[in-house]
Amino acid sequence: MPACAYYGCALLIASVIEGPHIRSRAALRKKWCNDGQGLFVSLRTNEDLKCKQRSVAPPPAQKDNRCLRSFCGKVSVNSLGILILRYFVDYAIGQRLTCVDDRFIFASLQIQAMAESLITNALNFRSLHIIFHLLVSDLVFGKIHYSIREELEPGAFIGNVAEDLGLNIRRLSARRFRLIPADKRQCLEVNLETGVLFAYERLDREQLCLQMPACVISFEIFVEEPLEMYRGEVEILDINDNSPNFPENVILLQMAEFIAPGSRYPLESALDPDMGTNAVSVYNISPNEHFGLKVETAEDGTKIVELLLEKRLDRERQSSFQLMLTATDGGSPSRSGTARILITVLDSNDNAPAFDSKAYKVSLIENSPRGSLVVSVHATDPDEGSNAEVTYYFSHRVSQKIQELFILDPRTGEIRVQGIIDFEEEDNYSIDVQAVDNGSPAIAGHSKILIEVIDVNDNAPEILFKSVAGMVPEDAAPGTVTALINVIDRDSGRNGRVNCEIPKNVPFNLQTSSSGHYKLITSAMLDRETTPLYNIAILARDSGSPPLSTNKTIQITVSDINDNAPRFARPMNTVYVMENNVPGASIFAVTAFDPDQGQNSYVSYTFTDNFIQDVPLSTYLNFNSMNGTFYALRTFDYERVKHFQIQVQARDAGVPPLSSSATLNVIILDQNDNAPVIMSPSAQSGSAGVEVVPQSAGQGYLVTKIIATDADSGQNARLRYQVLEATDPSLFIVGLNSGEIRTARGILEQDSSTQSLVILVKDNGQPYLIFGQIRYSIPEELGRDAFVGHIARDLGLDIRRLSAAHCGGPLMTEGST
């Protein structure tokens, strides 16, 4: 079972039914942990109950005798979607307790008892999930701890992370539930659909953590929608699965018979990979009258075992000894290991070299160059001659790794660097050295070198992206989490303190936490149409001297929402269509632009079917709704329809769709497609009109006025009059613009009594159309198909441009006449 998850002193686990508009009752259980670790809270829901006091039975006598209390309170949801306990009422003391800054800091009461019956009021949520809310950490939503024994086989069940964290197991896949180990060890695995955590390989504590006092495998759990991070750890508990073992099964010692009682001889300690009580705790030696054991504990916790001479030796009585050394661990049941000690008693050389100090403590700067002096040890031997000549060696217990890093001059006792000293790999070393004289047999003295490695700023910060939301909608509210970032620096102290920052000209902020975790959040509303992509450079700089820094770029893509309606270039526009257009041809088009993306930018068009002189507009026009092009279904006639309006709407394909409208003023342009028509004097039966002029008429006498009309407009309807043919051209004139026929002079006796005039009426259009008359006198006896006259030539028309002619009627032609 997982341990109580906590940071600081309080934790909230809130579980609320998902769904729209929930009114629920929640029973809140609180238990104050006796070890001060935290306040554990669970929440369950029922429907449609109002807040009321509920009695609680007292606890059993054998339990804690603190009284139980009833509470009624209110919860709400903050901007991040986290369920927050706002206040509750303690009925036992009649006091309302408040929560400050969305954290569980309860006023005027230290909760030390179990409590039940917190009932929520009118919860109105679209979707809530199981959430952890902590006192201290704003970034980490919860922490889960498992303790298991080592030697579990692959596939062994550890726990259900999702269930223990209160996550909805059915939504794990949708929320992209995943586990990220804190280091490169792949010894844990999680089922991404069920949340079950199991051993990926056999968990051997000694292999995973070596001699670390606590073996903890850390991991992080990430879920999205909303983005949340949980921390977890699995503590591997040691079992007594290893027996103590001596490096050598047989220990050979030589001792001079004159060695004084009290002399000590270091022995190789037994090795036991187990830790704590399962490690070696006791050394024993087989019963004898000359030797005992001296066991001391070093500063690093290891035991130093020495063979103590308790009674003077006499080689002549006994020249050798065989003892049994036993090491026993503290496990239950205990395990032990043995080694034989073979002692040969020799004559002479009865003094061992003695170091100036039993332990040398020195400091060494990491990355010290090869050849740097670490320490110089010195030992003296009170013997004389060769028995006083001292040579220095590393003890047999010094590991191969240390011997690769350091070299000891056997003559001078100088220890120098010969490898790479890296503080991040090891911050201290303990080296056993011995000084051996040149006697026969040789006697050794022992000392210890304790080296503290001083950190230098040789590691730049590392930026790790734990989780990145590659797409962020442009309507994301400020404060939306887009990425979780972890910044680490392997250096220590000031060299390992890191400051992380991003450019100030982007709508994002970094929120920090004390553990080196950062949240990249939006600080303002985003606009994809302005900036669809952000490449945010993250700079991490430590506080070393000189400081080291690292840059890493995170890419955030802004996803589109349908926040822009299609836009016409102008809300009101005027288009011109020439009359007599060809049916079926495109006559004009409208275009709207939508700056959104994808289907949000796909534009279709519609228009309102108005009426033109009681005729539906749709009978005049056909419309392509995809590209906004209008096609004519019929020919427009300016003389019937001069202008009309069309209401056009552009709609995008977003959800929901957005639209805008524009008004089109369609102006029909006039063509010169109508010839002038003479209204007065009117011709009857194809003959010219007859006017009577008195013989006494003088100059300027108004004979008649020709009245003509033209259905066109503008210049196309501006008419001009001229005499095309006359019996006597000098007798009559016609007004160019008025059409008035007047006498140009007085009528003379010799003038013919019958005068014939042919008047030409033409408009001012291009090309202009004319109307004229011609008169032929035809004898009654004229036969069929007889030649009467040449109309075109008689009217002065250009035969090549003649379009039509009607005998005795209007003539329509292009060009000048």
Image (cartoon, rainbow, N blue to C red):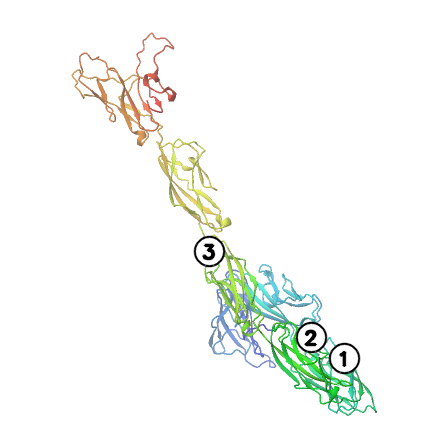
Question: Foreground residue, 740 or 509?
Answer: 509
Gap in angstroms between the C-alphas marked 1 and 2: 27 Å
Disc 3 crowd rating (10 Å Cα; few below 14, some 14-19, many 20+) is some
Mark number, residue 337 = 1
Report the side of 128 relative to 644 (left or right).
right
Question: Mark 1 and mark 3 in contact (Cβ < 8 Å)?
Answer: no
First in sequence: mark 3 or mark 2? 2
Q: Residues within 10 Å of mark 1 (few under 14, many from 20)?
A: many
- In the rendered image, the vertical position of residue 235 relative to residue 766, given as above or below: below
Residue 415 horizontal side relative to residue 88, left or right? right
Q: Nearer the viewer, mark 1 or mark 2?
A: 2
Foreground pick, 754 / 557? 557
For residue 51, say whether it is visible: no
> Residue 422's mark?
none
Residue ID at (45%, 43%): 605
Within the image, what quadrant is residue 667 found in? top left
The picture quadrant where one finds residue 489 is bottom right
Sequence-earlier tag: 1 or 2: 1
- Residue 527 is tagged as 3
Report the mark closest to the observer, 3 or 1.
Answer: 1
Locate residue 637, reporting x and y percent.
Answer: 37, 31
Please, what is the three-letter code of the amino acid marked with disc 1?
Answer: Gly
User: Taking 580 as reference, is 433 left or right?
Assistant: right
- Sequence-earlier tag: 3 or 1: 1
Per the model, the C-alpha gap separating discs 3 and 2 is 62 Å
Task: Identify which amino acid the numbered label 3 is placed on.
Answer: Asp
Residue furthest out toward the right: 317
Label 3 to label 1, Cα distance in Å?
73 Å
Q: Give x and y (percent) for residue 781.
A: 33, 7
Secondary structure state at the residue bearing disc 2: helix
Q: Which mark is residue 403?
A: 2
Q: Position of residue 740 (x, y in %)?
A: 23, 23
